[in-house]
Image (cartoon, helix red, strand yellow):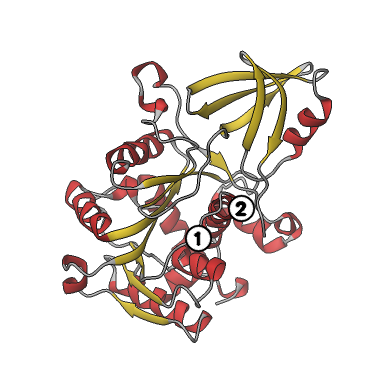
Amino acid sequence: MNWTELDWKALDRLRGQFLAGNPGIGPYWSSPSDLASYDITFGERIGWKWDAVLNELVTRGWAPGQGTVLDWGCGSGIAGRRVIERFGTASLGQLVVWDHSPEATLYAHDAASNCFPSLQVSMATPGYLSGEEPIGLLVISHVLNELKPAAIDEVRRLAARSRAILWTEPGTREVSRALGALRDEWMGSFRLVAPCTHDEACPILKADNERHWCHHFAPPPPGIFADSNWVKFGQRAGIDLRSLPYSFIALDRDWTGSSSGLSRVIGRPEYFKPYARVLNCDSEGLAVLTLAKRANPDLYKEMDRTKGPLVYRWVRKGPDVTAGERIHPRS
């Protein structure tokens, strides 16, 4: 599949179904062409979100342990492939894919096999999903707003078998807060790797913080704005190519790292002429912090230009930031 072969009617239909977010809608996919068209457009945009998530995890010092990767609800398999690509087949030697659509499961299987010839790729059987075999890493992507309670219970059972979980979703308020509730549910069994910098209950879910939600923005590849294919796709799909909001959780039973002293900026900073304002999350909870431009012009400029995860070690005087060091992603 390439840009000249895209099935635009299928993409229009898929876009409408995504926006509906109806748990009873059934499988999206009617043909391999649907999946191939999705994979290089909507799927690739999801891949950019996963790139941001995985970069941040490496920054925090995290890497998956040995064991099977299960890409549950895989769609075209973009999430599982991004994880394998980032950490390699040497440690992640087996990928299992599953989707409620057999067409999608087969597509994800074949796409991963083609990308990683040395990787052992298989399609999950009902026995595997209901069994007790340990799972090294459970990968879930962009499904939460469509899951019925029974499906969420299945995810809970899979989580109980998993050593680590990576779950990425759109950065909408409703989905983000639902993901945060699962994070709190599992935090007694797992160590929290990211985006949190603390092991406390999610402060966003407190009654006085109902207007907030934990979300971030991934940077799109800069070259797409000069790519006529992406420009046409953005116009046809009604998508702002500059905006890639996402929410995620990363949990690991065996993680020994620490984010002590770090803070995570929620959403985007707000910039005014004399100062910047951020919604900050750390071990003390949520707080609105202010950075005066004249107090630290270099930090103000750096924060304004930053495209990656906004993870900082602040020097503060009350709600005022006087200095800070950004924890930089590593390639």
Q: Measured from the top left, where is residue 225 in percent x and y?
A: 73, 54
Q: Which residue is mark 2?
A: 234
Residue 63's label in the rendered image is: 1
Q: Quadrant of residue 101?
A: bottom left
Q: Residue at x 33, y 59 (%)?
A: 163
Please state if 136 lies on the left or on the right of 45 as rendered.
Answer: left
Work out whether residue 300 or residue 20 is closer to the camera in this orientation and state it.
300
Amino acid at the residue labelled 1: Ala
Residue visible at 73% across and 54% down?
A: 222
Residue at 27% from the left image edge and 74% from the top image edge: 124
Q: Is residue 31 visible?
A: no
| Left or right: 185 in relation to 34 | left
Viewer-proximal residue among 323 and 141: 323
x, y percent for residue 188 = 29, 41
| Amino acid of disc 2 | Gly
Q: Residue furthest top?
A: 318
What residue is shown at x 72% (from left), y 61% (from top)?
Answer: 228
Q: Could you tell whether 312 is left or right of 168 in the image?
A: right
Element marked by disc 2? helix
Q: Is residue 168 above or below residue 82?
A: above
Position in image of residue 241 (x %, y %): 63, 49
C-alpha separation, residue under disc 1 versus residue under disc 2: 34 Å
> Residue 282: where, in percent of width, then height?
51, 29
Decide: few, some or many residues near mark 1? Use Cα within 10 Å; few <14, some 14-19, many ≥20. some
| Whether residue 59 is situated above or below residue 312 in the rendered picture | below
Choose the circle earlier in sequence order: 1 or 2.
Answer: 1
- Number of marks in the rendered image: 2
